[in-house]
Amino acid sequence: MKPQTSSHWNRSLAVIAWAAFVISFFLPSYAKGRGYQCAMMHGVFWAGAMEGNWLAIHYLLLTLPNLLMLASAYLLLRFGGNSDCPIWLPYTTFAASILVWSFLILLIANQAGRDIRVGAYVWATAFVLLWLSVFLARSNTTEPKILNPA
């Protein structure tokens, strides 16, 4: 008989990632704004993005990682314990982490970096933890048991 392989994600890291993501919404993230206030500033950045302002475009692109984080609970529960886990999930969570951290690095490199608060770092760390929860997945191989009639 052929051994069966099942893929498991690191649930504790994923839960910590989701908790950090939620907590970051209520922490001070930028200047005097809390995370949820920063998340709702799309209207402010839309005009700048239409004029080609890279920082504004980058900010608007952060919608994608946030949607991935929200959808990840379903994705990991639906596919996490099965061997048919989507192959793209580790790659998309890695790309989301890179996008989020590159935005913070751009802010730090500009004058705006001095206004970054703890919530932004907690938010960005949540994406790294989500990626690690998928990337550090354990693969268990189980041999089928053969009963010997004795």
Image: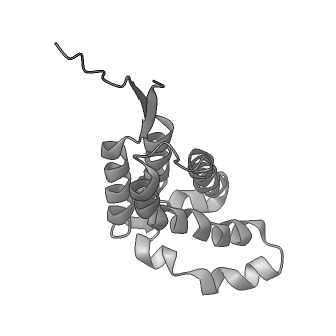
Residue positioned most to the front: 150
- Horizontal and vertical percent position of residue 98: 62, 49
Q: Is residue 68 above or below residue 38?
A: above
Of residue 78 and residue 28, the one placed in the foreground of this image is 78
Is residue 117 in view?
A: no
Q: How is the image coloured?
A: one colour
Of residue 65 and residue 8, the one placed in the foreground of this image is 8
Specify the quadrant of the image occupied by residue 142: top left
Residue positioned most to the top: 150
Query: Which quadrant is the C terminus positioned in?
Result: top left
Horizontal arrangement in the rendering, residue 86 relative to residue 6 (left or right): right
Horizontal arrangement in the rendering, residue 105 relative to residue 73 (left or right): right
- Horizontal and vertical percent position of residue 15: 32, 52
Residue at 47% from the left image edge and 59% from the top image edge: 75
- Horizontal and vertical percent position of residue 115: 51, 62
Q: Is residue 141 above or below residue 95?
A: above
Of residue 120 and residue 90, the one placed in the foreground of this image is 90
Residue at 47% from the left image edge and 69% from the top image edge: 31
Q: Is residue 66 above or below residue 76?
A: below
Specify the quadrant of the image occupied by residue 18: bottom left
Specify the quadrant of the image occupied by residue 50: bottom right
Residue positioned most to the right: 52
All told, the count of numbered labels is 0
Is residue 150 in view?
A: yes
Residue at 39% from the left image edge and 46% from the top image edge: 81
Horizontal arrangement in the rendering, residue 142 relative to residue 58 (left or right): left
Residue at 48% from the left image edge and 25% from the top image edge: 2
- Horizontal and vertical percent position of residue 55: 71, 66
